Amino acid sequence: MKRHPTEQIRNVALIGHGGAGKTSLAEAMLFQAQVIDRLGAVEAGTTVSDADPDEIERKVSISAALLPHEWGEHKINLLDTPGYADFMGEVVGALRVSDGALVVVDAVSGVEVQTERYAQMARAAEIPCVAVVTKMGKEHADFEQAVEQIGRMAGVQAVALQLPIGSEADFKGLVDVLTGQALTYSDGQASRGDPPAEMADRLEAARESVMEAAAEADDELTEKYLEEGALSADEIRSGLRRSVLAGKVVPVLCADALARIGVDAVADAAAALLPSPAERPEVKGTNPKSDAEETRPPSPDAPLAALVFKTEADPFAGKLSFFRVHSGTAHSDSNVFNATRDSKERIGQVLVPRGKQQEAVAQVPAGDMGVVAKLHDTVTGDTLCDEAKPIVLPAPELPEPVLSVAVTAKTKGDEDKIGPALNRLAEEDATMRVSVDSQTRETLLAGMGDLHLEVIIDRLKRKFNVEVERGTPKVPYKETVRRTAKAQGRYKKQTGGRGQYGDVWIELEPRARGEGYEFVDKIVGGVVPRNYIPAVEKGIREAMERGVVAGYPMVDVRTTLYDGSYHSVDSSDMAFKIAGSMALQAAVADAGAVLLEPIMEVEVTVPDAQMGDVIGQINAKRGRILGMEPAASGQLVRAQVPLAEMFQYATELRSMTGGRGSYTMRFSNYEEVPDHIAQGIIAEAKRRREEGER
């Protein structure tokens, strides 16, 4: 593949709902560009994009695929992204390094929820979009309805640049609105001719809409259009492109990837209407030494600034880092500086994907993308740059995981393998989180949804031969007391030789929530010798950690040691440690022990239509509504909800809102568990203890 100047590069994200036809369209574009000599199919698991075994098995895209190809004088770096919400992080990363987007809409289903969401993300990033209505050959395909829905989704005018010839099974081509020519297809090749006579009125109306959209590009075109009522073909093309780049209009195309109808026109539109890196604003970043904001121009001669947007583990090449060069040039066999990690990296051979193979290249200039293997410290979101001119570019703002499960090894021999294997997978997937709960000692795996977690667990087995079982995480309850109580702990044991004796009196009292534990020594007169007091405190602390009521740690209490007695021969550290533990247990029985549960601060973004359902469900989960306010895509509901009620909320919210709802959650505080719920938790803890003793 030859080197292309920045002005001839197009970095294009292919976005849309799962099943809309993105991967089939990408495959057809590669075939038309002669990158591949055989057209693969999603159902057969033979596409270039979906090469991962998990993608082939499930017949869905899981990760973004970089598909560079030449189209005329241009190089198009196509990023085929997943459509399912579980893999949204891949879409975020792809949009972060794209200059334009092809929004793919199913001609039958129309605009679906993830299409809306990803189009909103593109609009927020000020990425110009062109829409493609695919699957035009399917039964019930409706191009006009799709155009109308795209306009509502985009919030700007959607104009059809093409009109379909025929419909459903009779779909055989399209009419180019700008030229008025008909393109009919046979085996992916277009024949030009005159449009059907019966389409004359529709064609005239469509051309008028395109002309109006082009006229809005600037005042001069608007004035000419108002005065003369028409624009030349060149003026329409020029004005339309400027309107697209300004985000004022979304052109709409029609295609059928499987029949290879309109695929060439999609590539033409991507090259002609979407911007080059040179037409985008200069990239902004932060100087890690001064924290000052700096910019870098999209010039191959400027200092290097490249963003790693994706990491992948290749069974043969090792860790692969996908990067976009925003400024300067990345060379093979060179040294670069990772400004994010403050470390040096050695770049070996720079590669670009070419079908299912990789092609070695000498360099990747500004605006282009490449891949390098075996970087030591670099992960997704890091900036590679010139050490003399360091800069940290903004990393993709990845969504937080919404669903957590506890994972345990199926066999004892795999217990030590789980952590390292999950950490290796986390290098590839920045939207998964791995942690160990310090209280429950469970290994927790968090992801974007059920499907996401299934894929991670399958990869554990396939890549690392580690099999795990998943379960609902334990809630890290805690214990405390409501009132003050005093109690004695007296440990006396006589044996044939030296005995054991320790005797203490303590006062147990509650503290304010979050104040933690305090031990107070009020011993006077040496009734408990000074050398035994640390043992008393240790016994109390260990009893608190084990829990008294249900086996959960006790918090937010003060214990005061104020009296006791000792034996000059039989007393020991061990005896006073046991006495302290006994005293705490006795005091808790009279101090009104209660369970505490973690309360989460939850923010739910929900469409207006489902507002009542969401609030009702939060109330049913023992939640408290804190407030509501307008959001970009509906309403934002702020609430506090017990963690115990939230483990399946991601799935429930997705089902309730048709996938349009989203939420974030973070820890807020601990509160008392209602008595009727606490009784069940205590009974279950007692049952587990009895089973363990047996």
Image (tube, rainbow, N blue to C red):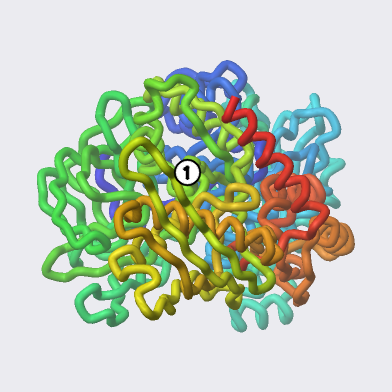
Residue found at x 76% / y 76%? 627
The residue under label 1 is: 441
Q: Quadrant of residue 391?
A: bottom left
Q: Quadrant of the N terminus?
A: top left
x and y percent of residue 506 in the render?
A: 52, 69
Whether residue 458 is visible: yes
Q: Quadrant of residue 42?
A: top right
Near-viewer residue (225 or 468): 468
Task: Assign a secondary structure to mark 1.
Answer: loop
The type of residue carrying mark 1 is: Arg
Residue found at x 78% / y 60%? 674
x and y percent of residue 298 in the render?
A: 30, 65
Judge the density around disc 1: few (<14), some (14-19), many (≥20) Cα neighbours within 10 Å: few
Above or below residue 330? Residue 387 is: below
Residue found at x 79% / y 71%? 625
x and y percent of residue 431 in the render?
A: 49, 48
Judge from the rendering whether residue 611 lies leftward or rightward of residue 47; answer left or right. Answer: right
Residue extending farthest to the front is 496
